[in-house]
Amino acid sequence: MIVVTGATGNVGRPLTRALAEAGQQVTAVSRHAAAVPDGVRHVVADLTEPPSLEPALDGAKALFLLLSGDLHAAGARPADVIGQAAAGGVRRVVLLSSQGVATRPFGPTRITMRAVEDALRDSGLEWAILRPGGFASNALWWAESIRTQGVVAAPFGDVGVPIIDPADIADVAMACLLDHRHTGGVYELTGPEVITPRRQAEAIAAALGSPVRFHDLTRDEAMAAMTQSLPAELAEDTLDILGSPNPAELRVSPDVQRVLGRAPRSFADWATDNVAAFR
């Protein structure tokens, strides 16, 4: 049995589906009730309360751990989830961490995630750590304005980073869950090229077959919009990277190719696959 946390999200959903299609027994975990693929068991649990995971971990051999907002919740002890997994008999954990643990190690959110990584390394379990940069799916923040106004509003329109398709993260996670050759691996996951928000808007327009106008937001305007759905610290960290990526954040990593034997998908590929969200 493989347990997938965050199973209804942009990484967890394709990972759950791919594992099920490969014939694996899968338990999908999310905070709320949700539809899952046929044959997949679903368990509602809250990662800010690790004991709530106990029913999901029963009989599990491996865990994909995606902490998401649980990492930043008041009073959260995300490293406790590692102990809960070990106590439940899990032998292998694949942790979705962040590129920023290495590229910006002193930010508050990065310090917390580093502590989770360290807890996993010290747990005695088999492990692999995935450190993606920016997600292509963050472009879904623009879906409503594209549908209603034909516009993308974003800061730093001509500053790019090599964002990654979450489906590629899912494919790497699946490889790490199933293949012991990846035990002890730390993988930096990026897309195949640096791409700016302005060029992302152009790629979405090409997928739609209709114009999309780009509107450059100020940092303050972007901050106000982002804090409606993100903790302020995380929004600040994200804007720091988007506005002034350092050389490590601009680097195109070979790790997707190394694990999967193929190049990562481009943002244009992601836009084509997800064009329905923008119509």
Image (cartoon, helix red, strand yellow):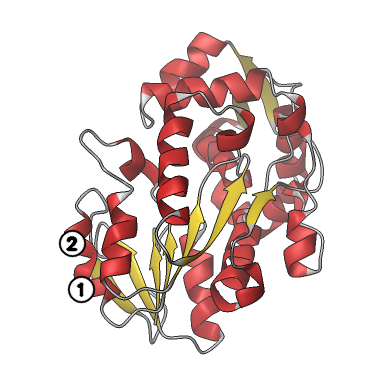
Q: Quadrant of residue 102?
A: top right
What residue sits 57% from the left and 30% below the top?
A: 149
Q: Looking at this view, is 256 or 157 the one in front?
A: 256
Q: Is residue 135 left or right of residue 24?
A: right
Given residues 16 and 81, the one toward you in this image is 81
Question: Would you name the residue on which mark 1 appears?
Answer: 55
156 is higher (above) or lower (below) than 169? above
For mark 2, what is the residue? 52
Q: Are marks 1 and 2 in contact (CB under 8 Å)?
A: yes
Quadrant in the picture for the N terminus: bottom left
Label 2 environment density (alpha carbons within 10 Å; few <14, some 14–19, many ≥20): some
Residue 24 location (% of width, % of height): 48, 86
Q: Is residue 60 left or right of residue 278?
A: left
How far is disc 1 from disc 2 in space, using C-alphas? 7 Å
Q: Is residue 102 left or right of residue 26?
A: right
From this view, report whether residue 260 is shown above or below residue 26: above
Element assignment for label 2:
helix
- Of the residues shown, which amino acid type is indicated by label 2? Ser
- Residue depicted at 70% across the width and 43% down the height: 204
Q: In the rendering, at what x and y percent does residue 40 appear?
A: 37, 81
In the rendering, which numbered label is found on residue 69?
none
